[in-house]
Image (cartoon, rainbow, N blue to C red):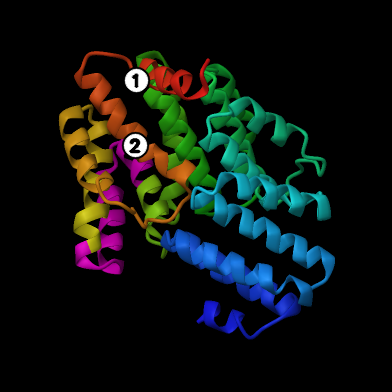
């Protein structure tokens, strides 16, 4: 409905319509729909103020990145920031491109050079710190990524799942890469996160959030809340989608937390063999499930997950 009404709108009304359609497509994992919305917005830029037209470029940049059109995404993001230097969403799109290309140093530099400051009221502040920490992980700086978690990612500005999702997404990656010593160090952090998620475990949500809540509950072995999340997801989603994608991911998360790596790898593969997960979240965020499957495989071979990911990164960057 939003996408169809966008065709006949203009000005700031078109920007609002387009933004809502963009976010709906993002939550549904519909990358092509998001890109189509971005391209329609681009055609309507002539009806808008210069600032609004620049914001459209930022939305288009993210859609291009999610569809793998990296060069065009960078151009669109930089054009957006040339109009609106405070457009954190355009910066976010550029960082996504750099991280998908495994250029973590440039991604962190782009975040560091953002001129608008990082106060508590900054839109997407925690999520951008999450990206900064992902860059640190990409360079093998686990201790610095943990400091980033403690000092910034957990400096919440409001109650709700969105900021806790980034915390879980970083902590789970640290857990996979850090080994037993890190796991012991992170145990109190998991307890705090699970308590935070428990306050809204039954809230209406989308699949990507559900899966991160499940990670927190699995790590503290609260399978009452874990099962409640799974049941909530089952009631919302179609039976085919739930059994082919959602259920294997939930089961893989639980198995990994219990160090049953054979089961985790096997059931994760059932979901990851799908051409599109359609669970929401970006491609950079969704790689947590591929990391989990690959980490389980590494454990089964008797190797350390961090060795696997380091070799992947060096092979892709030429370092």
Read off the magenta span.
Answer: 214-240
Q: Tell me, yes or no, if residue 148 can be seen here.
A: yes
Q: Residue at x 22, y 41 (%)?
A: 269
In this rendering, is residue 158 above or below 20?
above
Q: Quadrant of residue 156?
A: top right
Drawn side of residue 106 relative to residue 206, left or right: right
Give the image location of residue 151, x and y in percent: 64, 30
User: Within 10 angstroms of label 1, few (less than 14), some, or many (20 or more) residues?
Assistant: many
Residue 312: where, in percent of width, then height? 41, 22
Can the viewer see residue 156? no
Dot 2 corresponds to which residue?
290
Residue drawn at x 52%, y 42% is 166
* Residue pictured at 22% horizontal, 44% vertical: 251
- Residue 190 counted in the magenta span: no
Mark 1 to mark 2 CA distance (whole Å)? 12 Å
- In which image quadrant can residue 104 be found? top right
Q: Secondary structure at mark 1?
A: helix
Q: Which mark is residue 305?
A: 1
Residue in front for this viewpoint, 268 or 185:
268
Residue 140 vertical placement versus 25 (above, below): above
Look at the numbered discs 1 and 2 and tell me whether their residues touch, using CB distance below 8 Å.
Answer: no
Residue at the spot 41% in from the left edge and 39% down from the top edge? 287
Q: Nearer the viewer, residue 100 or 187?
A: 100
């Amino acid at each position: 409905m939003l996408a169809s009404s966008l065709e006949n709108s203009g000005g700031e009304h078109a920007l609002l319509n387009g933004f809502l359609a963009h976010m709906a497509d993002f939550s549904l994992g519909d990358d092509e729909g998001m890109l189509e919305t971005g391209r329609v917005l681009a055609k309507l830029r002539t009806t808008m103020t210069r600032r609004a037209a620049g914001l459209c470029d930022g939305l288009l940049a993210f859609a291009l990145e999610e569809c793998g059109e990296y060069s065009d995404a960078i151009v669109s993001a930089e054009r957006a920031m040339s109009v609106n230097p405070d457009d954190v969403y355009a910066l976010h799109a550029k960082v996504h491109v750099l991280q998908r290309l495994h250029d973590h140093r440039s991604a962190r530099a782009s975040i560091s050079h953002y001129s608008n400051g990082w106060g508590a009221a900054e839109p997407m502040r925690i999520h951008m710190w999450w990206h900064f920490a992902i860059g640190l992980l990409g360079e093998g700086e686990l201790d610095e990524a943990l400091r980033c978690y403690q000092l910034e990612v957990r400096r919440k500005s409001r109650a709700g799942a969105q900021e806790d999702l980034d915390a879980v997404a970083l902590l789970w990656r640290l857990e996979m890469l850090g080994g037993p010593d890190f796991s012991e160090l992170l145990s109190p952090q998991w307890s705090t996160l699970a308590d935070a998620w428990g306050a809204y475990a039954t809230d209406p949500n989308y699949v990507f959030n559900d899966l991160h809540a499940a990670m927190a509950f699995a790590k503290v072995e609260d399978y009452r809340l874990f099962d409640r999340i799974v049941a909530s997801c089952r009631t919302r989603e179609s039976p085919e989608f739930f059994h082919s994608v959602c259920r294997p991911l939930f089961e893989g998360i639980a198995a990994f937390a219990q160090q049953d790596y054979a089961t985790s790898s096997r059931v994760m593969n059932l979901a990851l063999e799908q051409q599109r997960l359609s669970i929401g979240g970006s491609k950079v965020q969704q790689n947590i499930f591929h990391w989990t499957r690959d980490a389980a495989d590494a454990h089964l071979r008797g190797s350390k997950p961090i060795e696997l990911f380091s070799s992947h990164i060096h092979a892709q960057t030429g370092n």
